[in-house]
Amino acid sequence: MQTASLKIGTRGSPLALAQARETKRRLMEAHGLADDAVEIVVMSTAGDRIQDRPLSEVGGKGLFTLEIEEALRAGRIDLAVHSSKDMPTILPEGLHLSAFLEREDPRDAFIGRTVRRLDDLPEGATVGSSSLRRQALIRRMRPDINVVNFRGNVETRLRKLNEGQVEGTFLACAGLNRLGMAHVITELLDPTLFPPAPGQGAIAIESRIGDDRIDALLAPLDHRDTHIALSCERTFLARLDGSCRTPIAGLAKVSGDRVSFSGMILTPDGREAHEIRGEGSIADAAAIGGDAAERVLAKAGPHFFSSWS
């Protein structure tokens, strides 16, 4: 394939840069591209700039993607690299998630300051998390402890933890692995008890619909099983109108030509939770996620979300 000049748009956090570099490396290996043929363009997003308030109060997930997507639509970059769990279910017109790199470990990690496990925290201890899903799950498992909002990138949160602002925090295992920081994990949380966010652990590549050149370049990078799993999880999320204001968990697993899914919706206080499962052919992955959403919503009742939104 002829050498192409490519511009990859990304946020500027260490984790976002690690994901962009992984995408660049895979593109170079797949197509024999020189290092200077692929440029990483670092962009600031509102989600990065606003650190004093929960995302749910200022616009949700789209705050991490808006400026990058505007550059993509305008042709200033050729593709964008994101954490899949940060992606809204409705994308701007003309854009799509065209490829997913092979998923890393989707589990959540607990990092304790003086204890190793969430269960070991003393009554009344304070832990920090910026995710409403994690906050709700923490309250469900340990209603006796205090949960505070904890914004910032991985390094910032770990610094705050070491300073003693909290006794523990929660991060995605995948992000710590990609940063070479798995050693800070004190407990890997069981996904059956502490299920991850839909898309957690997967790198999503966003591009323009109908851009045949980019589609051809990205095709070798797209991991089949991850793409199938994300189709299931994101449909579940979309049917439930998932955003940073809704504690929703979901994880799909592909085995051969079958996909299994487990999902959960919770109230923010963790007191009410509804779980759901589904399984079927990989050809029906999206439908399995959508059906699971309809069934869990029926279990919860039509006013489940509106009762606390």
Image: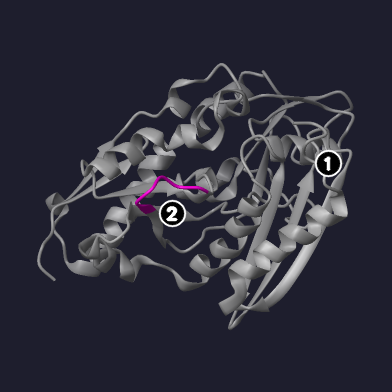
Residue in view at x 38 percent, y 45 percent: 18
Residue in view at x 28 percent, y 61 percent: 210
Q: Is residue 238 visible?
A: yes
The residue that label 2 is drawn on is: 204
Residue 250 is labelled as: none
Q: Position of residue 181 (x, y in %)?
A: 51, 43
Query: Considering the image in quadrants, where does the C terminus appear?
Result: top right
Q: Is residue 226 left or right of residue 127?
A: left
Instruction: Place residue 267 in its image quadrant.
Output: top right
The residue that label 1 is drawn on is: 303
182 relative to 287, above or below: above
Q: Is residue 27 left or right of residue 10?
A: left
- Is residue 242 or residue 177 the one in the foreground? 242
The mark nearer the N terminus, 1 or 2, is 2
96 relative to 112, above or below: below
Q: Amino acid at mark 1?
A: His
Q: Which residues are magenta?
A: 90-95
Q: Is residue 188 visible?
A: no
Q: Residues within 10 Å of mark 2 (few under 14, many from 20)?
A: many
Q: Residues within 10 Å of mark 1 (few under 14, many from 20)?
A: few
